[in-house]
Amino acid sequence: MHKWEAIDEANKYIKERINQTPTIGLILGSGLGELAEELADAIVIPYQEIPHFVMSTVDYHAGKLIVGKLEGKTVVAMQGRFHYYEGHSIESVTFPIRVMKMLGVEQLILTNASGGLHIDQQPGDLMLVTDHINLMGINPLIGANDERLGDRFPDMSDTYCKSLAQLARKVATQIGVPLKEGVYVAFTGPSFETPAEVRMARTIGGDAVGMSTVPEVIVAKHAGIKVLTISCICNLAAGILPQPITAEEVYEAAGQAKENFSKLLRGIVENM
Ligand code: HPA
């Protein structure tokens, strides 16, 4: 099926089930999905019911789309995202962003878990992503371009919206949640990076490494959606400390950060 028709089919399916138009999208990453449970007047749609949505295969990622109110704003939240390492096509990974756009989303907040590249970072630190480096070896815009979805060659110089970043800084200061800033470097995973890859990521200007977000951000930018990304640094990346990295420590750190994360996101959404 033509991409546009597939997006429209998912869009129509969701629109039939909701009675409010979300203008804010929220993608909640590993261990950070609980906020979606707090939406008021929520309509919950499991991914498997939505045409052309694939299934989330990772533990700690629920597969639900939730439309409801957060701080008085109508949001559409993805509780659990799709990752390229799950074996989904890059088109499937980014499909929900295009559906969000058709639903009416103008601003998108993405969250993720990442590994810090600096010794002074602590598990649980929140980092405002100010830019990214794509080392996934893929780009979701490869292929024929449908001009209805966006330009053939989208500019990426202002991808992480400066005014949303400013709002995030302001809210973080107001509520007393420390917010670091930095560049997110995306690898495909699912293996964690090698120590040499971690040194490279730091040398080329990275501050955190992760396995998601960048494909969605590229598609959001293509679609003209304003992007805010906040990463939870869950561990120090490979080789910085002597011990190996485990998925458990990542989820545990994300869990510990969730209170601050939730306060920060609520404050941001309230002022969007
Ligand atoms: N590397 C890649 N992705 C991650 C990490 C990491 O160290 N921690 C959490 N997600």
Image (cartoon, rainbow, N blue to C red):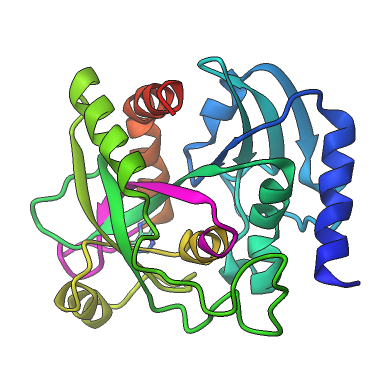
Instruction: Confirm whether the magenta stretch covers residue 234.
Output: yes
Q: Residue 55: image x %, image y %?
A: 75, 55
Q: Quadrant of residue 200?
A: bottom left
Q: Quadrant of the C terminus?
A: top left
Left or right placement of residue 149 versus residue 216 in this view? right
Residue drawn at 73 percent across, 51 percent down: 99
Q: Quadrant of ligand 1?
A: bottom left
Q: Quadrant of the N terminus?
A: bottom right
Q: Residue 5: image x %, image y %?
A: 88, 62
Instruction: Confirm whether the magenta stretch covers residue 25.
Output: no
Residue drawn at 56 percent across, 65 percent down: 222
Depth check: give the residue in front, 229 or 167: 167
Left or right placement of residue 60 versus residue 184 in this view? right
- Residue range (magenta): 221-245
Q: Residue 38: image x %, image y %?
A: 57, 19
Q: Is residue 181 visible?
A: yes
Image height check: is 41 above or below 78? above
